[in-house]
Amino acid sequence: MSDQQQPTRVSPLQALVSVFRAWFGVQTDANRQRDFNSNNASSFIIAGVIFAVAMVLAVVIAVNMVLP
């Protein structure tokens, strides 16, 4: 018998939320298992790139606000 679950489809919004939660370390084990059991890595790659760009832009904006 196999203990592995069937692959699930993760929407782009679910992938973005999972990346956001994982970044801050508040991802639930159930969601982590769902993410790893999905067979669509492209959603997570795109979400990761979007999140990384947003974080860089946030840092640039914060620095520009602090420095004259």
Image (cartoon, rainbow, N blue to C red):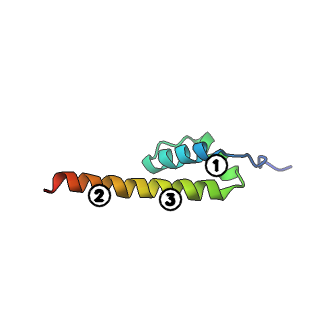
Q: Secondary structure at mark 2?
A: helix
Q: Give the CA separation, mark 3 to mark 2.
A: 17 Å
Q: CA distance from mark 3 to mark 1?
A: 17 Å
Query: Where does label 3 land, which residue?
Result: 49
- Residue 35 is tagged as 1
Q: Secondary structure at mark 1?
A: helix
Q: Position of residue 46 (x, y in %)?
A: 57, 57
Distance, label 1 to label 2, CA atoms, is: 31 Å
Residue occupying the point 17% across, 52% down: 66
Asked which quadrant contains residue 11, the reply is top right
Q: Is residue 4 left or right of residue 48?
A: right
Locate residue 55, reporting x and y percent: 38, 54
Is there CB contact under 8 Å for labels 3 and 1? no
Going by the numbered disc 2, the residue's amino acid type is: Val
Answer with mark 3 or mark 1, whichever residue precedes in sequence: 1
Q: Which numbered disc flags the more N-terminal residue, 1 or 2?
A: 1
Q: Which residue is mark 2?
A: 60
Picture layout, residue 56 above or below residue 15: below
Looking at the picture, tell me which residue is in the foreground, 41 or 34: 41
Dot 1 alpha-carbon crowd within 10 angstroms: few under 14, some 14 to 19, many 20 or more: many
Lower sequence index among marks 3 and 2: 3
Q: Residue at x 59, y 54 (%)?
A: 44
**Kind of element beneath mark 3:** helix
Of the 4 image quadrants, the one containing the C terminus is bottom left
User: Amino acid type of disc 1?
Assistant: Asp
* Dot 1 and dot 2 residues touching (CB under 8 Å): no
Pointers 3 and 2 in contact (CB under 8 A)?
A: no
In front: 27, or 63? 63
Q: Could you tell whether 65 is left or right of 23 in the image? A: left
> Total marks drawn?
3
